């Protein structure tokens, strides 16, 4: 006699439920996603006792027809797809027809719904005694209540954490869905207390403000980037306010909350050198792609998706972050100007326009918009270090590109007010007082120059410098000659384990670091650890920039300070030192006046 039994529906539902509903947070996610799929413009989610005692989601969506009511709790019953082909490019958040079957098999579940085209509402109730369906008065829409989660599965219930922890797990679920759908007004209530209400006015900024509060919203900068196939819009945290964990990173893909290693890596790469290692940026980034280019059916909780082209996603997120820095304007300020209406800032456009390139973004928004005062200009006698800046400045003026001209036109007006403790340069404009950290600013400039240096920014040496390496270093350096060249170094073998350096990064020319960085790069190349070579090189460049930069408390001449300030104001990408410390801080005149009661 055979030993294989077919499990009854109830048992197989309960087993399947483990994947779909493993704790209150996942049940809540499923219910809210159903409300979003039903076209709701208002959703209220409420939990009690960590969601185990009660989970309730009420919406004003299209509702459920009478004949569909019993089908909602059947497995593989869905109104969202008909055949497997419909899975390609599926736009709804649900598509498996599993969630309510799972939930109703592990919780006492009540569904009250009135379809928009029906005169009557209905109530379906399901518990250990079976399923009932009655007529029930109801406004248009649906309210689903699940009580006593895992009442019939004591083993599973035992694995639930304390109520406070289960509530804590529910919070980000509702937060993220509210951010993914700013066009829907969300209300979230835990144990009778209102956590947040979003306005549903379509503004992502307003949704972030409602969900995370004024302070977080105030420290965000808008980020956007668009190509023909991908658009990224949203906000990233200002590098001045990095987080201790990745918890503040929210990625949304076509209205879905997703976990994506690619997007996360791109975000963090974009912040590299802007914030210290071990700290993390926060973001709410909406990635929009052709639905056909992602597979949403690769994860049981629909959390992960598979992109047809991961690289493109990486690039788009990275560029959005970099655009954000060049805009360098706080979201809050933009919104005050925009009268709190959500207008995506730059890089987002109507269909007739071409997407903005990174440089256009900077051009559109020269930051900061100072005017330049002639008298001050003449005070700039000796351009500040790096030493080759003199050459650079003159060659720039000879072949000034339209972009440079525009920036120069936009450059302006500050008055050099002096220096504090040989450390901070003080400048003023009509509306601000700005303190510049001399060392941090200079360090960042050198770093950027080395990083951006390609052959053209290499300084040829009249007499080469010879350096003796270990044989491993020599071999590794020869193998990576093209990478060295990118940093501005060209060299040749000079007999034995010695090489002769022919060109060095212009930014380090004449400093001790011109040789030191070369040695560091050789050591990095020979170092057998798994850390990627580019990362090791970056580290060496930080160190070289730090050492080559003017020190804090070191005396510098006013004209040098002015040149540094000027350079800084025309380089919107330079706002943080390579270790993530800010290079400048501005005090608004209005705030100073306010302080003195003026
Ligand atoms: N709030 C709601 N408003 C209107 N219809 C709903 C609502 N919740 C569920 N339904 C209906 O019940 C069906 C079953 O819901 P369920 O969540 O189990 O499956 P699904 O959303 O289709 O797929 P998935 O399992 O991926 O979530 C849905 O396809 C939908 O037709
Ligand atoms: Mg669903």
Image (tube, rainbow, N blue to C red):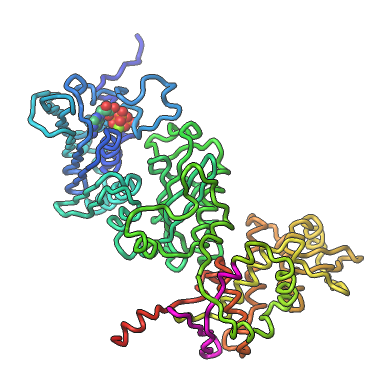
Q: Is residue 526 visible?
A: no
What is the span of residues highlighted in magenta in the rendered image? 407-431
Rendered image quadrant of residue 564:
bottom right
Q: Nearer the viewer, residue 525 or 226?
A: 226
Give coordinates of residue 484: x percent, y percent. 75, 61
Q: Nearer the viewer, residue 407 or 119?
A: 407
Give coordinates of residue 229: x percent, y percent. 53, 39
Residue 108 highlighted magenta (yes or no): no
Tell which quarter ligand 1 is in.
Answer: top left
Rendered image quadrant of residue 129:
top left
| Residue at the (68%, 85%) spot, across then down | 381
Rendered image quadrant of residue 545:
bottom right
Quadrant location of the C terminus in the rendered image: bottom left
Q: Is residue 360 left or right of residue 446?
A: left
Quadrant location of the N terminus in the rendered image: top left
* Number of marks present in the image shown: 0
Q: Nearer the viewer, residue 215 or 413?
A: 413
Q: In the image, is residue 425 above or below residue 328? A: below
Give coordinates of residue 443: x percent, y percent. 61, 75
Q: In the image, is residue 585 above or below residue 45? A: below
Residue lying farthest to the right in this orientation: 495
Residue 426 highlighted magenta (yes or no): yes
| Residue at the (50%, 76%) spot, across then down | 584
Q: Is residue 221 visible?
A: yes
């Amino acid at each position: 006699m055979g030993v294989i039994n077919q499990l009854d529906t109830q048992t197989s539902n309960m087993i399947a439920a483990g994947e779909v509903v493993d704790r209150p947070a996942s049940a809540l996610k499923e219910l809210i996603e159903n409300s979003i799929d039903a076209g709701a413009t208002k959703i209220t989610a409420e939990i009690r006792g960590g969601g185990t005692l009660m989970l309730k989601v009420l919406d004003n969506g299209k509702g459920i027809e009478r004949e569909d009511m019993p089908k909602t709790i059947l497995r593989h019953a869905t109104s969202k797809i008909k055949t497997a082909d419909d899975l390609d490019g599926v736009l709804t958040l649900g598509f498996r027809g599993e969630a309510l079957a799972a939930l109703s098999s592990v919780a006492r579940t009540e569904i009250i719904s009135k379809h928009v085209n029906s005169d009557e509402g209905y109530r379906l109730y399901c518990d250990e005694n079976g399923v009932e369906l009655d007529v029930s008065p109801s406004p248009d829409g649906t309210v689903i209540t699940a009580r006593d989660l895992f009442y019939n599965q004591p083993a599973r219930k035992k694995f639930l954490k304390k109520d406070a922890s289960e509530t804590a797990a529910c919070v980000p679920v509702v937060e993220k869905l509210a951010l993914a759908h700013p066009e829907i007004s969300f209300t979230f209530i835990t144990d009778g207390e209102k956590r947040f209400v979003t306005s549903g006015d379509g503004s992502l900024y307003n949704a972030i403000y409602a969900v995370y509060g004024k302070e977080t919203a105030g420290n965000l900068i808008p980020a956007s980037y668009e190509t023909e196939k991908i658009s990224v819009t949203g906000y990233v945290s200002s590098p001045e306010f990095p987080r201790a964990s990745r918890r503040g990173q929210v990625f949304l893909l076509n209205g879905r909350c997703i976990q994506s290693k690619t997007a996360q890596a791109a975000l963090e790469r974009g912040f590299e050198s802007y914030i210290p290692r071990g700290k993390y940026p926060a973001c709410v980034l909406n990635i929009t792609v052709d639905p056909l280019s992602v597979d949403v059916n690769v994860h049981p909780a629909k959390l992960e998706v598979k992109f047809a082209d991961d690289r493109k996603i990486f690039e788009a997120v990275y560029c959005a972050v970099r655009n954000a820095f060049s805009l360098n304007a706080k979201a809050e300020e933009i919104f005050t100007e925009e009268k709190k209406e959500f207008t995506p800032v730059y890089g987002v456009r109507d269909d007739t326009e071409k997407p903005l390139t990174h440089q256009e973004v900077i051009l559109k928004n020269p930051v900061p918009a100072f005017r330049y005062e002639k008298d001050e200009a003449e005070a700039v006698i000796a351009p500040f270090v790096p030493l080759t800046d003199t050459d650079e400045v003159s060659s720039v003026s000879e072949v000034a590109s339209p972009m440079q001209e525009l920036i120069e036109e936009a450059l302006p007006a500050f008055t050099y007010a002096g220096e504090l403790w040989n450390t901070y340069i003080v400048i003023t404009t009509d509306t601000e007082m700005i303190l510049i950290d001399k060392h941090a600013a200079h360090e960042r400039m050198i770093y950027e120059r080395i990083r951006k240096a390609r052959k053209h920014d290499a300084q040829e040496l009249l007499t080469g410098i010879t350096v003796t390496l270990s044989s491993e270093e020599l071999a590794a350096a020869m193998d990576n000659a093209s990478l060295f060249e990118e940093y501005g170094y060209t060299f040749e073998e000079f007999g034995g384990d010695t090489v002769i350096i022919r060109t060095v990064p212009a930014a380090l020319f004449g400093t001790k670091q011109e040789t030191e960085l070369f040695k560091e790069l050789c050591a990095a190349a020979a170092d057998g650890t798994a850390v990627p070579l580019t990362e090791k090189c970056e580290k060496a460049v930080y160190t070289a920039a730090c050492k080559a930069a003017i020190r804090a408390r070191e005396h510098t001449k006013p004209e040098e300070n002015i040149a540094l300030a000027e350079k800084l104001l025309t380089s919107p990408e330079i706002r943080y030192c390579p270790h993530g410390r800010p290079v400048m801080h501005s005090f608004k005149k209005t705030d100073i006046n306010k302080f003195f009661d003026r």
